[in-house]
Image: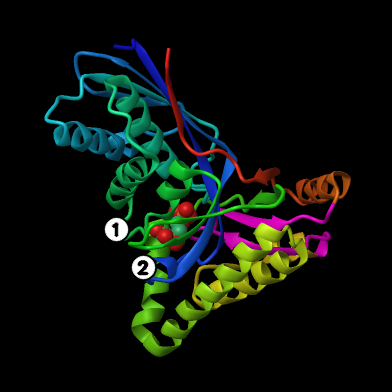
Amino acid sequence: MPRKAVCEAPGKVIVSGEHFVVHGATAVAAAIGRGVRVEATRSRTLEVRSNVKRREALAPVKRVLESLYRSRESEPRISISVASALAEGAGLGSSAATMVAAAGAASELEGWRLDPLALAEAGAAGERLVHGNPSGIDATASALGGVILFTRGKRPQTVTLRRPVSLLVAFSGRKRNTGRLVAKVSEMKAGYPSLFAGLCKSATLVSTLCSRSLADGDAETLGSLMTYNHAVLARAGASNPGLDRLVELCLGSGCLGAKLTGAGGGGSVLAVPPPGRAEAEAVARRLSKAGFRSFLTSVPAQGARSWSE
Ligand code: PMV
């Protein structure tokens, strides 16, 4: 039996289809090169601590582990230590990555060897405790890694890229609450059911086109689709003036496309930077001058990985 098990799980960005994915549309998500590292060691009781999350915010992680051990007719006598490089409330999937990494480290310690889809399910179960009606896309992107086409209740499809694609993530500086935003967008469904059904259909189409342009490395098309996507999400109530201004700033600084990513209402903007490292870094400098932190990331990135020490 190993004395210590480690699992690293990446955060994610949603390239297309957030919110509509909750209602059955297809979305595209990509794991990013930053994430969460969890170490699991033996203990007399279940203990969870974190470098970023408050104690109350760790309750769902405990519940996920309790349920995992219960399903194996066993008791969680482990200590879990979470170190996250993902800002909370930034829309980069920090809570899903934490759940996936906690389940991954615990199962590595116990020798259960859960496959990526089982880890995704454990993560999604945790997300259900955090906000009422998650699609499961965050946990699936984190567990599987790479770029995925995701439809709720169906097996995710991996999108193979001809070459890595560079993306820019810019923080709006405002935390958002996924549950509240999902409920807000769902109000549009209640008020305008036929319009909403049409938007779900077009979100699926846009996601398919985004996955093709990612696969082909066609940054121009990807960028236009993403900007269009932002306009639709704004109409559905997921944006706000701060996010709209940040999208405008990215586009005005030479990005080929930009949109809110994840739930919206704050969090982050995802943009396709202009081609060339120097040009992309110039955009990041311009954003920084305007008071926004950003980073460049390359997709695809690895999914959750576990090992024993
Ligand atoms: O929590 P976020 O910001 O990563 O958003 C997740 C994406 C949503 O479609 C808004 C919700 C979901 O569960 O799919």
Question: In terms of image quadrants, where is residue 193?
Answer: bottom left
Give the amino acid at mark 1. Answer: Gly
Q: Secondary structure at mark 2?
A: helix
**Coordinates of residue 241 in the picture (x, y in percent):** 62, 68
In the depicted structure, whether residue 204 falls above or below residue 100: below
**Coordinates of residue 47 in the picture (x, y in percent):** 27, 22
Q: How many marks?
A: 2
Q: Are marks 2 and 1 in contact (CB under 8 Å)?
A: yes
Residue at which label 1 appears: 132
Left or right: where does residue 36 sit relative to residue 45? right
Q: Secondary structure at mark 1?
A: loop
Residue ID at (73%, 48%): 291
Mark number, residue 183: 2
In the depicted structure, whether residue 22 falls above or below residue 129: below
In the depicted structure, whether residue 242 falls above or below residue 39: below
Nearer to me, 214 or 266: 214
Residue ID at (65%, 74%): 228
Per the rendered image, the range of residues in magenta is 252-275
Q: Quadrant of ligand 1?
A: bottom left
Q: Is the C-beta of the residue carrying label 2 under 8 Å from the nearest atom of ligand 1? A: no
